[in-house]
Image (cartoon, coloured by chain):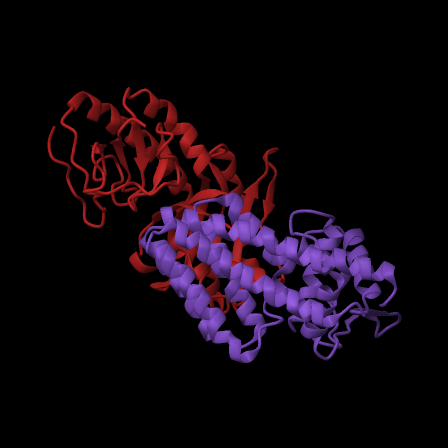
Chain colours: A red, B purple
Amino acid sequence: MTALGQPPGAARLGHPVLADPVLAARATSLLTGITQRIGQVLARVTDIGAAAESIAAATRAAGPLLRRDDFSPLRRLAAELLRAQAGLAAGAGIVLAPGTLADAPRCIEWWWADQQARVSQLHVDLDPESAEFYDYTTTEWYREPERTGQPSVAGPYVDFICTREYTFTVAAPIRCGGRFIGVAGADILAAQVERLVLPGLAGLGRTAVLASGHGRVIASTSASLPPGAALPRPPQASGFATLAGPGEGPAPRLLPWSLLTVPAP
Amino acid sequence: MGSSALTTVRARTLFAPLDAGGRAETVARRLTQAITLGLLLDGERLPAESQLAGQFGVSPVTLREALAMLRDLGLVETRRGRAGGSFIRAPDDPQAVQVEAVLRLLSVHELRDIGDHRAAVAGAAAKLAAQRALDGDIATLREHAGRLHAARSRTERRRADARIHVEIAAAAQSPRLTREEMSLWSEVGDLVWLPVADDQVAEVAAEHDRLVDSIARQDPEQARQAAERHVQAETGRLLDLRLRMGTA
């Protein structure tokens, strides 16, 4: 097994790499599979971002003021995303940078699908307490695309704004006239990602976990290291070895996730 | 105001958690908070019922129910005619008046029980956060603890305080504990800063720093104890104030 490539920006968790090419190949294939599924959601998020950019550019060309209603056509794209990615995406939409709109200081245009696949708009209420909770500009999924100008996958984290569940948010920057004006995004429930990867993880024949680039367990076959746990790092992590990632798969920068074997509980 | 029936309505209005209870109660509670916190000003005219119903995502019937509750509470006045509509009637110091009224509605027993519940949730959340928080989570907690020091009004302090506790539960990676903290804070959060005198503010903010420090040190037991002691101190101040109010 060759040494793992280390793409810029992808955090290595620092565990040794297991020298088992067969197991590594299966793990890489599993990681590639989930990365591609999330990539499909990102492709639609990018479409929403591009549509928002067209709307912003066209509106600004006609007059300087952008209004909230200008973005209402995005509802159709968000609904299409939720339909096409039903079972994976739980919500989708855009948020705009403070001061972008003439008629609202901040803006969340976000839609979610209920279990009957009915699409509803997320309502941002008048409650100033919630207004504080809805300060999306401090969230990882807003700050990363703002900082890097690139799409990002934030999480898993407890989303107390929209899903109120353990969630990933796939987000892409929206730009207008070279300036960052917000992000397009979609929420993916962590439980759905677990459903997609757990059979493959269990099929590896070793106690194994999928971990985020931050070192957070996403899915696990170990009861003593469940989802949400912080992955022990060397030197406290004896018996841990990397099977795949980060730096493999189709999107190492976007999704610097790793598959590791961990000691049996 | 004043009759026991209306008082019950008021209690229901203020206490209905976001997800539970009727939609009319939720709308009424949100409008009440907006008035209490000065977002809607005395004499201000509310938008047309159909428009307001649309903004809240409720039917016009539900909105009219909510407005009727607010009329009962004396917070909204509806006038007929050409210059008619629904108008806000805010008391001079709505925050203090209403929060004290809420405190008066709670028995000492209920306050103690709420304190026990909050200590259990905050303690469990702090313990798990100490086990699970990563560097980014700690940075978020410190940011919000800093906001509490910088807060200048009781409203700002309550908001920063609520946010710290919700973020600790989020750092525990537990949606359930997070929802529990949110629900507790929306239920009784207005009370927490009521008995805190100006010269005690810095000490209460420092209590939060120590709580965040113990989570950052990854010491689960110490974090749980810090959270429990913090909530117990808050509950003690509230019980003192409630007992001083007497039974009037």
In the picture, measured across the screen, residue A73 lies left or right of residue A149, that is right
- Image quadrant holding the N terminus of chain A, namely top left
From this view, report whether residue A262 is shown above or below residue B46: above
Q: Position of residue A2 (x, y in %)?
A: 10, 31
Q: Position of residue B7 (x, y in %)?
A: 81, 61
In the rendered image of this protein, does residue A48 appear above or below residue B239?
A: above
Q: Is residue B174 visible?
A: yes
In the figure, is residue B57 to the left or right of B81?
A: left
The part of the image, by quadrant, that contains residue A263 is top left
Identify which residue, A104 or B237, lies in the foreground: B237
Report the front residue among A96 and A195. A195
Q: Position of residue B247 (x, y in %)?
A: 79, 67
Q: Toward which corner of the image does residue A47 lie, by quadrant?
A: top left
Residue lying farthest to the left in this orientation? A2
Query: Foreground: B29 or A122?
Result: B29
Near-viewer residue (B82 or B10): B10
Quick one: quadrant of the C terminus of chain A? Answer: top left
In the picture provided, is B21 more to the left or to the right than B229?
A: right
Q: State whether residue A26 is above or below residue B103.
A: above
Residue at point 50%, 61% (across, down):
B230
Q: Is residue A144 visible?
A: no
Give the tally of numbered discs: 0
Q: Residue at x 43, y 45 (%)?
A: B173
